Amino acid sequence: MSQTFHRSANTLARASILGMVLLLSAVGSALFKLQRSPYVTGQHIAPDQPVPFSHQHHVAGLGLDCRYCHTSVEQSSFAGIPPTKTCMNCHAQIWTNAALLEPVRNSFRTGESLQWTRVHDLPDFVYFNHSIHLNKGVGCESCHGRVDEMPLMYLENTLQMEWCLSCHREPEKFLRPRKEVFSMTYQQPSPEHAVEVGGTKYFSQEKLGAALKDMYHLRTMRDITSCSTCHR
């Protein structure tokens, strides 16, 4: 009986299978990178806002504390967006006729809130509590980046689950004294730079983080990486 397929068919079949595997791998890799790209996360992209508010000017230039505008951040799950009255505490006296601030003045006159675009906007299925993180020694800068260097606010970190878990698995790498959580210029301890807590000086983040974990009563790594901690 004559051979139905040419001998080269075996080679073509193997090449086809290998090509399909390579193609699927390439597509998977591309989708993996796309999911973590600024196109999806919005990372490092400043969205349009009704007023181009500069954290750099207000925080670094004027020295405003985060809590002046985000009043609920220490006691509540949300940081809070300041009402127009907070803006007008200053701008009723300075820049009173600036065209840039007309939306603020109009909001104050009419009582209609400014429609800010949220920069750090987690999905509805994710629970995040600002007060817990601050009271456990996690600084604003750890998540939001150096806002004192941002003329326009943008997303510094992806806020994706793998990024959150990197901290929840090893929180001691990021903890700082509570008095430093609002500092934008805080430096972790090093052999050349000590951080004092409770009368003890620490020269490494490893020792400081371990001490703060006990001092601030952090739950176990198993607890804070449990699905139910963030997905309720």
Image (cartoon, helix red, strand yellow):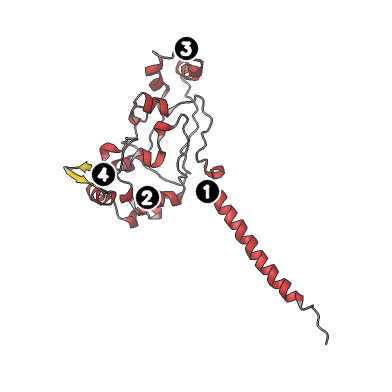
Identify the residue position indicated by label 4 in the image.
192
Label 1: how many Cα within 10 Å (few below 14, some 14–19, many 20+): some
Dot 2: element: helix
Residue type pointed to by label 3? Asn
Q: Residue at x 26, y 39 (%)?
A: 178
Which labelled disc corresponds to residue 36?
1
Dot 4: element: loop
Residue type pointed to by label 2? Cys
Q: Residue at x 33, y 47 (%)?
A: 174
Identify the residue position indicated by label 3 in the image.
97
| In this picture, residue 76 sits left or right of residue 12 | left
Extreme right residue here? Answer: 2
Identify the residue position indicated by label 2 in the image.
167
- Decide which of tag 2 and tag 4 comes sooner along the chain: 2
Q: Residue at x 62, y 56 (%)?
A: 27
Dot 3: element: loop
